[in-house]
Image (tube, rainbow, N blue to C red):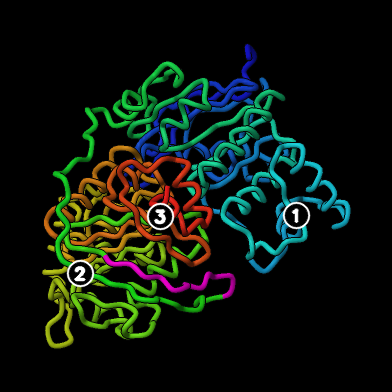
Amino acid sequence: MTDVLLSLSGLTKAYPGVVANSDVSFDIRPGEVHALLGENGAGKSTLVKTIYGLVRPDAGQMTLRGAAFAPSEPRAARAAGVAMVFQHFSLFDALDVAENIALGMENPPPMRDLAARIRDVSERYGLPLDPSRVVGDLSAGERQRVEIIRCLLQDPKLLIMDEPTSVLTPQEVDILFATLRKLQAEGTAILYISHKLEEIRALCQHATILRLGKVVGTCDPRETSARDMAEMMVGTVLQVPSREAAVAGEVVLALTGLTAPPPRQFGTALCDITVEVRKGEVLGIGGVAGNGQDELLLALSGEMRVGSEMVRLKGQPIGHLPPNARRSRGLLAAPEERMGHAAAPDMSLTENAVLTGVVREDLSDRGFLRWAKARTFAESVIAKFDVRTPGPGSTARSLSGGNLQKFVIGREIMQRPEVLVVNQPTWGVDASAAAFIRQALLDLAEAGAAVIVVSQDLDELMEISDRFAALNGGRLSPPRPAQGLTVEEIGLMLGGAHDMEVAHVDA
């Protein structure tokens, strides 16, 4: 732990209108799990892309094991012993595990030999993986294993992990941490990015905090509270979401026997989902990725049509209606995939505001768009939700992930929905922005809306939900009051124990 593996000195990278990294310096040592913390837009992604050869710095230098290190591309970084597991997986659903891993290798061995190596490495590190399975049939946790095994086959000296637990169950997180600790014991250094600060405290020995592209502090996470780290990241006192105890009103949204085939290959069919959501209530729906979350949102938003009586809004059947017709009646939705689904990357924020706000914000007149009003609406979302951007003319692509998420959620909330369905509202969002979004959802419910929050972040769901249900294989468990649920009960519900409510009552 005394020798330096990777040293960063004065790294600076500027883009038009923003300095992403400014004079960033710190060291990573062999066998160290080093956290890189910061708000969305703090410069974390630019920094790790520099280390991995995707970005060239404007100034500064790096050394790896004492030698100059300036990879011109990821291939050079990998050859030097640097591997990276990205937040968004780069896998082909139609190929099997071994074929996907071979695509990421410079000189892959014969498939039989590669399959044997995959089995050997996956078993050695506690990440069981069948090389012959088709990736489209894998859970999100298993897909992540493919990415990790792909990296471990390179025998890396430094492993960069970007939000690795965002798609994992608590049990899968434990397995991942056991693997990382084994790598650490073997001398592999790990640069770990996460917004889940309790995970940072459990896993990391050192943390470097970025704010507005600069290093603003370091700490030992084992000796620093999550709240203190969050406040170092944002530079101010962190506000904790709160609201008065919910008083649920009449039923606003009712799903009855909601059943639908998957809209695409490797999707998940919805099976007999029945639930009611009341005015002023937050219903939290948890589940491991790939268990029907996307399909449920499509069925509720109107992007996927179902039987008209399967979805009723204020007593009226709407299962057959398209999205804008549902929006006009008060049912709005924000999907998980913000870039490409919730927002068009190359359109301006004003244009993206029009995409979903044209009906409820009256942004057209006899077929002509009212651009001045649309721009005002976009500006109000930017101001109200503290979206860091030069203005409404900026493209969605130019925003950091967290700022685009704030815009997407704000765009829906400011249309005053009677029912709002959101999928992964704070995914990849820093602590301050996450607290802001959660408070906005709570305020919306307190104002009388029915809110459905679909999330893989169980802490988030327990914090804001009145009732909790779990999706598993396209089936929804009976909702239960969120207060008092134990981790064990939640784990059983996520695993498909849909008779938990009955078992709980009988006990």
Residue under label 1, please give it: 130
Instruction: Determine the secondary structure under disc 2.
Output: strand
Give the residue type at disc 2.
Answer: Val
How packed is label 1: few (under 14 Cα within 10 Å), some, or many (20 or more)? Answer: some
Please name which of the two marks, 2 or 1, marks the residue nearer to the observer.
2
Q: Quadrant of the N terminus?
A: top right
Q: Tell me the residue at 27%/46% (across/down).
A: 464
Report the front residue among 117 and 455: 455
State whether residue 423 appears in this view. yes
Going from N to C along the chain, the mark reached first, 1 or 3, is 1
Report the front residue among 481 and 424: 481
Q: Which residues are magenta?
A: 265-276
Residue under label 2, please give it: 252
Residue under label 3, please give it: 501
Please name which of the two marks, 3 or 2, marks the residue nearer to the observer.
3
Give the residue type at disc 1.
Answer: Asp
**Where in the figure is residue 496, as x and y percent of width and height?**
52, 57
For residue 366, side relative to residue 430 (left or right): left
